[in-house]
Image (cartoon, rainbow, N blue to C red):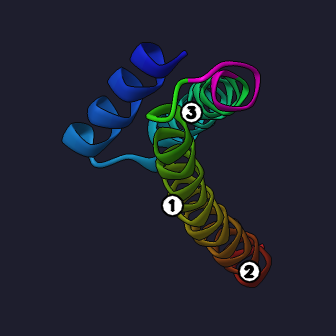
Amino acid sequence: MLAAGSLLVTLGHILRTYQIELPGLTFSLGGVGLYGYLSWEATTLTDSPGSGPRACLMILLAASIIARLRALLYIDRRARRTVELQEEIEG
C-alpha cells in the first residue's frame, strides 16, 4: 500500500494533477496506518523500545497525509462548484 500510494502521489506531483494524487494519498494513509498499528503493537506486546517512537512518527505522518487529503478535497469541491456555476450561467 505504501509503495503504490507513494508512486501515485509522485506521479500526481509530476503531472500536476490532484485526481491521481488523491487515491495515492488514500493508499499511503492505509499503509502508514497499518505500519503504525504494527509498530504500536510491537511496543505494547514485546520489549522493543524502538517501536514506540516509530509508532508516534507514523501517527504524525498520518496526520500530515490527512491534512493534505482534506486540502485537496476542498480544492476539488471548489473546482466542481465553479464548473457548475459556469454551466448555469452559460446554459
Instruction: Answer left or right for 91 relative to 52.
Output: right
- List the single residue furthest toward the front: 47
Of labels 1 and 3, earlier in sequence is: 3
Q: Which of 2 and 39 is in front in this view?
A: 39
Which structural element holds mark 3? helix
Q: In which quarter of the image is the C terminus?
A: bottom right
Question: Can you identify the residue that label 2 sits on?
Answer: 85
Q: Do the residues labelled 3 and 2 touch (CB within 8 Å)?
A: no
Amino acid type indicated by mark 1: Ser
Give the x, y percent position of residue 76. 62, 62
Give the x, y percent position of residue 64. 51, 60
Amino acid type indicated by mark 3: Val
User: Residue drawn at (66%, 29%), measured in percent from left and top?
Assistant: 30
Instruction: Answer left or right for 53 relative to 42.
Output: left
- List the single residue furthest toward the left: 14
Which structural element holds mark 2? helix
Q: In which quarter of the image is residue 72?
A: bottom right
Instruction: Answer left or right for 18 relative to 72.
Output: left
Question: Looking at the magenta stretch, what is its main secondary structure?
Answer: helix
User: Residue drawn at (47%, 21%), measured in percent from left and top?
Assistant: 2
User: Residue drawn at (60%, 51%), measured in percent from left and top?
Assistant: 59
Of labels 3 and 2, earlier in sequence is: 3
**Magenta stretch: residue 62 in it?**
no
Question: Can you identify the residue that label 3 sits on?
Answer: 32
Report, in whole angstroms, how far the alpha carbon at label 3 lies from the one at label 2: 38 Å
Question: Can you identify the residue that label 1 sits on?
Answer: 64
Mark in the foreground, 1 or 2: 1
Q: Do the residues labelled 1 and 3 touch (CB within 8 Å)?
A: no
Of labels 1 and 2, earlier in sequence is: 1
Which disc, if any, is residue 5? none
Q: What stretch is highlighted in magenta?
A: 42-47
